[in-house]
């Protein structure tokens, strides 16, 4: 163990004069960066701008060639044994295909060190891959596969043709029997029957001969192919077994500390989760690296922050220099162990953000009630917070069970319709499912956008490693379409109307923020943009057919931003 000072960047007293220390450690999954974290991040960003020797293409220089890979960076504000304040820096994954960079803390386990078991095993795996590739490119193997495919097609064609001919012969014999039975005497009919039976046996014999011929011919080719295929299968099985063993060995090498000095392997950490095993690249994110280094070197963690540096990936919403929370899928189980015993800022998801906010009733009859949901009030009870549109209506209508037809995100304000009867619920819900309901939202975007109206079509799917965030995915995403129109431009913002033609999770937020959409996050969007007093997204207009009167009804509530 070293002193830890070789990786610390100490603050100048003048930079942090008058800034109070954090009372608690940052809650990593939802936070506003502490002033010390902002200073540290700004200094690190200055380092990244001025040190081009990192030899990594972040996509910030159009003239630079090579694969563009933006990167998440993290800082950890720490206090050393002498009470001096500074910060540690880290990056997620690898930087320029290396883990060894003087400015940054090392990984929890460096699989790229010379003569490491990982590189040795990787050499063996690469050798197996080369053997498989050599067999699959062998001229004789390719010729045999082509012959097998060619002769299989011919055999199937000839067998199908003889089957059809035998079927016709059988039909002809049946017809002949019926015709001749009426005109031939018993003796001549018996002779005819014997001839037809002989003809039938001959057909069957020809069919068996053809099938036998092709079976023997194809067996010769398959036997020759099996020599290659068996070797490939053996090599692939060996590769799978070695890969699994290597992965298990890596899981055991990643051992994480906490403030008590307790170590826990990656495998043990994720064996307690619903997944049962670590996802790919678990343990390589910035914050676990930072905490590990701090614990190993007797440094007291005070605050953390992570920011994105470079061009965004095609699937995610990531803005250059913007702060983001730690990921949930990979980091949450690890940080649960590493931060044990450290007092943290409260988890806002466990706090009732809607407390004290009024739920306005804008219409009601015997069938349904229409409400104006305030921002931050849940539509339905959550795991930790019961207060919601549902719970408040249930308390209001004694003996009537509110039937939720649709939902708004907690941070979205605006119109919700809730049924009072099962018939009304079934009727209006069917209208939502068939997309005959007209919905219009109003949003305030975080910059001035080009164009006046248009349509966005970006397929979406959930980010399994970072719920509840969504990804743009053209391979597996669900069809997501939004129409939009500008209604007002200000100096730094744009107010738009949205008409969602599909109803995907975070559809409007993603279509606003993603670079292939409007490339302008909604003001206050702490998932895909920057947090503010509120998310400026409002369900302003709703139109549907009344389940009883069959008349068109519509409701409109002006946004408050």
Image: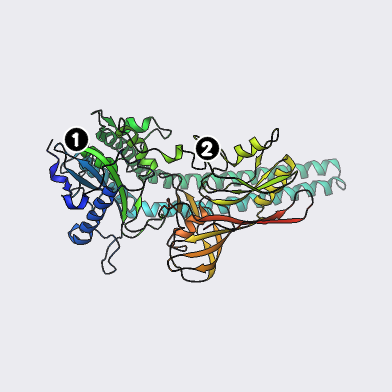
Q: Is residue 295 above or below residue 177?
A: above
Q: Residue 331 appears at what percent x and percent y?
A: 34, 40
Q: Residue at x 52, y 37 (%)?
A: 382
Q: Nearer the viewer, residue 34 or 367?
A: 34
Which of the 4 image quadrants contains residue 23? Answer: top left
Q: Residue at x 48, y 50 (%)?
A: 461
The answer for how far apart the CA atoms under marks 1 and 2 are is 38 Å
Residue beneath disc 2? 382
Question: Most extreme residue toward the bottom, as rendered?
Answer: 451
Q: Residue 444 appears at what percent x and percent y?
A: 49, 60
Which of the 4 image quadrants contains residue 260? Answer: top left
Residue beneath disc 1? 296
Q: Residue 207 appears at what percent x and percent y?
A: 60, 46
Q: Is residue 185 above or below residue 271?
A: below
> Disc 1, disc 2: CB below 8 Å?
no
Q: Residue 194 appears at what percent x and percent y?
A: 74, 41
Report helix, strand or loop for mark 2.
Answer: loop
């Amino acid at each position: 163990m070293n002193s830890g000072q070789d990786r610390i960047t100490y603050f100048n007293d003048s930079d942090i004069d008058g800034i109070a220390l954090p009372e608690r450690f940052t809650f990593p999954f939802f936070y506003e960066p502490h002033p010390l974290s902002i200073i540290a991040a700004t200094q690190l960003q200055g380092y990244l701008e001025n040190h081009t020797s990192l030899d990594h293409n972040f996509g910030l220089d159009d003239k630079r060639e090579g694969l563009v890979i933006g990167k998440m960076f993290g800082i950890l504000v720490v206090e050393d044994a002498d009470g001096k304040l500074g910060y540690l820096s880290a990056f997620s994954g690898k930087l320029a295909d290396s883990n060894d960079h003087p400015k940054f803390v090392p990984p929890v386990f460096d699989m790229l060190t010379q003569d490491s078991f990982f590189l040795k095993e990787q050499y063996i795996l690469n050798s197996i891959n080369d053997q498989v590739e050599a067999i699959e490119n062998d001229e004789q193997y390719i010729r045999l596969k082509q012959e097998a495919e060619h002769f299989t097609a011919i055999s199937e064609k000839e067998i199908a043709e003889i089957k059809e001919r035998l079927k016709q012969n059988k039909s002809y014999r049946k017809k002949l029997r019926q015709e001749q039975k009426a005109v031939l005497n018993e003796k001549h009919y018996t002779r005819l029957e014997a001839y037809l039976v002989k003809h039938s046996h001959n057909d069957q014999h020809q069919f068996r001969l053809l099938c036998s011929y092709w079976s023997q011919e194809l067996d010769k080719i398959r036997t020759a192919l099996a020599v290659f295929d068996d070797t490939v299968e053996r090599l692939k099985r060996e590769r799978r077994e070695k890969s699994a063993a290597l992965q298990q060995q890596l899981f055991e090498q990643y051992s994480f500390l906490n403030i008590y000095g307790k170590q826990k392997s990656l495998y043990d950490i994720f064996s307690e989760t619903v997944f049962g095993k670590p996802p790919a690249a678990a343990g390589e994110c910035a914050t676990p690296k930072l905490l590990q280094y701090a614990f190993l070197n007797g440094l007291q963690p005070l605050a953390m922050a992570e920011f994105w540096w470079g061009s965004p990936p095609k699937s995610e919403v990531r803005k250059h220099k913007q702060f983001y929370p730690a990921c949930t899928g990979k980091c949450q189980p690890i940080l649960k162990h590493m931060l044990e015993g450290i007092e943290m800022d409260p988890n806002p998801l466990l706090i009732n953000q809607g407390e004290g906010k009024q739920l306005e009733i804008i219409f009601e009859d015997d069938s349904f009630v229409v409400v104006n949901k305030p921002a931050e009030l849940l539509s339905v009870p959550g795991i930790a917070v019961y207060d919601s549109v549902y719970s408040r209506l249930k308390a209001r209508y004694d003996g009537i069970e509110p039937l939720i037809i649709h939902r708004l995100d907690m941070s979205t304000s605006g119109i919700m319709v809730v049924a009072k009867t099962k018939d009304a619920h079934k009727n209006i819900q069917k209208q939502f499912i068939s997309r005959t309901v007209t919905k219009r939202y109003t949003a305030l975007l975080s910059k001035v956008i080009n164009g006046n109206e248009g349509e966005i079509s970006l397929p979406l799917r959930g980010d399994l490693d970072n719920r509840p965030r969504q990804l743009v995915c053209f391979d597996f995403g669900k069809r997501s379409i939004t129409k939009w129109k500008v209604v007002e431009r200000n100096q730094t913002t744009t107010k738009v109307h949205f008409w969602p033609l599909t109803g995907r999770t975070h559809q409007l937020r993603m279509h606003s923020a993603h670079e292939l959409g409007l490339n302008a996050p909604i003001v206050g969007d702490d998932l895909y943009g920057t947090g503010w007093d509120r998310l400026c997204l409002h369900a302003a207009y709703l139109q549907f057919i009344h389940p009883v009167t069959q008349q068109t009804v519509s409701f409109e509530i002006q946004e408050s931003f």
